[in-house]
């Protein structure tokens, strides 16, 4: 690279990634093939519109790529093209969620989503997000005692508020979600059920987490977490008389975006094909095993684990409740020791989101690097030693 300043930063970041234990639940390491697609000549192509309906010329091959990516997305999650449509143009998870709400909910309408502090996402209607400024969030959360979803309480709120959509699927909820119960709740209050499976998409694809597709009307997902692809997003929608896919397509373009990033779409197509391999199924099984072992070991060392465990790729640890340290300080001390986590609120947190009570830990990235259960025990002991000694 001729630009020495940028080349230096790229080299530094590469060395940083290689020199740390990465426990960020929303990060992973992509293959060389995914990186090659991201850096391909497709970066040069502007392809505003959809396959066969573009506004510029020169789209013979990008249309083929578009169709291929859609086909692979449907096949990976065992969906029939006669029953489900998929939009592959959303640039990341937040625009994908915004597009769904923009397409399906009138301005000022009600979005029912989990409270951010309980594990929900900003784009599920939180007041600081555009989704909470244009629409009204009807929040729900977890039970204070068990720290897991109380579906009866969710149903009561839904019946009272009658939201247009209910969003299930979260950014910091470690337990398996009962999609069937959410379907029943959506039906009794007349809501569209939207599932955000961004964090668990790879687990669903690999068969270690229940699929939301038999129950959801719309499913959104990022592609860069457990799915191990580039930064991008997918929006699946049922094909029926409601024209969900048409409304969502129009919301993505021209509603909130211009031309798609075709290099990104190529990289998504590569990642989707990789996720069909038997190796990927072994990988996600190991992710869940690793997370359970890490959580159990932390419990043995005296740390309070939110919901008392995990069924997925992540755990939440109550740092403040265990040793009186804030999540920011814990994150900073661990990073100083080359262990990367993120500070995170916990349910009913009394501290600020800037310095919350907890940290969130995920094992997807380190499992990609080949770590197994025995490594998780070592990592847990390291975390315990660093935080208790404030090294």
Image (cartoon, rainbow, N blue to C red):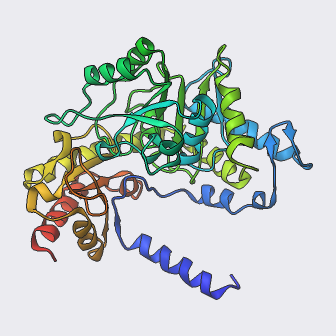
Left or right, residue 128 beside residue 341: right
Residue 237 is situated, as x and y percent measured from the top left of the image, at: 60, 26
Residue 168 visible in the snapshot: no
Q: Residue at x 44, y 33 (%)?
A: 204
Quadrant including the N terminus: bottom right
Residue 93 is situated, as x and y percent measured from the top left of the image, at: 54, 46
- Counting the numbered discs, the total is 0
Where is 380 relative to 185, above or below? below
Residue 155 is situated, as x and y percent measured from the top left of the image, at: 32, 19
Left or right, residue 7 beside residue 123: right
- Between residue 279 and residue 143, name the one nearer to us: 143
Q: Quadrant of residue 263?
A: bottom right
- Between residue 358 and residue 261, name the one nearer to us: 358
- Between residue 316 and residue 208, name the one nearer to us: 316
- Which residue of the protein is positioned furthest toward the bottom in this rendering? 4
- Between residue 125 and residue 143, name the one nearer to us: 125
Quadrant including the C terminus: bottom left
């Amino acid at each position: 690279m001729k630009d020495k300043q940028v080349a230096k930063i790229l080299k530094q970041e590469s060395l940083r990634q290689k020199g740390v234990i990465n426990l960020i639940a929303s990060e992973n390491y992509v293959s060389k093939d995914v990186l090659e697609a991201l850096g391909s000549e497709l970066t040069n192509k502007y392809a505003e519109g959809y396959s066969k309906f573009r506004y510029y010329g020169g789209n013979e091959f990008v249309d083929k790529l578009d169709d291929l990516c859609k086909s692979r997305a449907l096949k990976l999650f065992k969906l029939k093209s006669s029953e489900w449509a998929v939009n592959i143009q959303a640039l990341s998870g937040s625009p994908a969620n915004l597009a769904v709400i923009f397409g399906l909910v009138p301005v000022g309408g009600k979005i029912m989503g989990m409270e951010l502090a309980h594990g929900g996402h900003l784009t599920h209607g939180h007041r600081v997000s555009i989704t909470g400024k244009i629409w009204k969030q009807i929040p729900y959360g977890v039970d204070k005692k068990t720290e897991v979803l109380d579906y009866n309480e969710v149903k009561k709120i839904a019946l009272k508020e009658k939201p247009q959509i209910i969003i299930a699927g979260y950014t910091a909820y470690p337990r398996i979600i009962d999609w069937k119960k959410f379907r029943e709740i959506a039906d009794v209050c007349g809501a569209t059920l939207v599932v955000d499976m961004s964090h668990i998409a790879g687990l669903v694809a690999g068969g270690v987490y229940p699929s939301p597709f038999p129950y959801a009307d719309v499913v959104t997902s990022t592609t860069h977490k457990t799915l191990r692809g580039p930064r991008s997003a997918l929006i699946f929608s049922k094909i029926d008389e409601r024209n969900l896919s048409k409304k969502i397509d129009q919301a993505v373009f021209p509603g909130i975006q211009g031309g798609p990033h075709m290099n990104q779409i190529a990289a998504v197509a590569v990642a989707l094909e990789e996720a069909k391999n038997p190796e990927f199924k072994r990988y996600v099984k190991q992710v869940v095993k690793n997370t359970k072992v890490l959580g159990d070991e932390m419990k043995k060392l005296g740390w309070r684990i939110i919901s008392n465990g995990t069924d997925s790729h992540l755990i939440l640890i109550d740092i403040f409740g265990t040793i009186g340290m804030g999540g920011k300080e814990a994150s900073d001390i661990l990073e100083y020791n080359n262990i990367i986590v993120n500070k995170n609120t916990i349910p009913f947190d009394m501290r600020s989101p800037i310095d919350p009570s907890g940290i969130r830990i995920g094992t997807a990235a380190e499992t990609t690097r080949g770590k197994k259960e025995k490594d998780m025990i070592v990592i847990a002991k390291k975390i315990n030693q660093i935080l208790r000694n404030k090294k």
